[in-house]
Image (cartoon, rainbow, N blue to C red):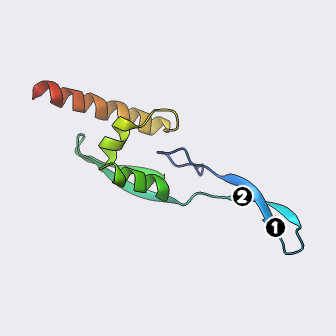
């Protein structure tokens, strides 16, 4: 399983460890990924995702998974989340027509 956030696309970064003697050695910085179940209001079900803590905060800030998916572009989303977004947008459109 790759270490990439399914919502934000945040992945590993490469940098240097720098010693007191200014020796530089390569190292990686991994994102803080968490396995979470986010609830979709329009689909009325939970979705298990591997999300960075930064991505989780942005979802909560925007008022939930559905609101965040509608606002975000598809560029950095994983394939699973793009399919989920398509379902959510379709369900919201159906409920708007019915109302």
- Look at the numbered disc 1 and give the secondary structure of its residue: strand
**Residue 35 rendering spot, x and y as whole percentages:** 45, 58
Disc 2 crowd, CA 10 A, few/some/many (<14, 14-19, 20+): few
- Give the quadrant of residue 98: top left
Residue at the top extreme, as displayed:
97
Q: Are marks 1 and 2 in contact (CB under 8 Å)?
A: no
Foreground residue, 47 or 70? 70
Q: Is residue 94 above or below residue 18?
A: above
The residue lying at 46 percent from left, 32 percent from top is 74
Q: Is residue 84 visible?
A: no
**Image check: 32 left or right of 74?**
right
Residue at the left extreme, as displayed:
99
Foreground residue, 9 or 19? 19
- Give the residue pinned by disc 2: 28
**Residue 81 rendering spot, x and y as whole percentages:** 43, 39
Q: Is residue 96 above or below residue 24?
A: above
For marks 1 and 2 on the same chain, the one whose residue lies earlier in the sequence: 1
**Image check: 31 left or right of 78?**
right
The residue lying at 58 percent from left, 57 percent from top is 31
The residue lying at 71 percent from left, 58 percent from top is 28
- Give the residue pinned by disc 1: 18
**Residue 56 rendering spot, x and y as whole percentages:** 42, 55
| Comparing labels 1 and 2, the label whose residue is closer to the camera | 1
**Residue 82 rendering spot, x and y as whole percentages:** 43, 34
């Amino acid at each position: 399983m790759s270490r990439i956030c399914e919502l934000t696309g945040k992945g590993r970064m490469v940098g240097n460890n720098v010693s007191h003697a200014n020796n530089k050695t390569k190292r990686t910085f991994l994102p803080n990924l968490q396995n979470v179940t986010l609830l979709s209001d329009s689909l009325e079900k939970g979705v298990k995702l591997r999300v960075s803590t930064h991505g989780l905060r942005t979802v909560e800030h925007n008022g939930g998974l559905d609101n965040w998916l509608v606002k975000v572009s598809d560029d950095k989303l994983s394939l699973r989340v793009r399919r989920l977004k398509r379902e959510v947008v379709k369900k919201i459109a159906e409920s708007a027509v019915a109302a």
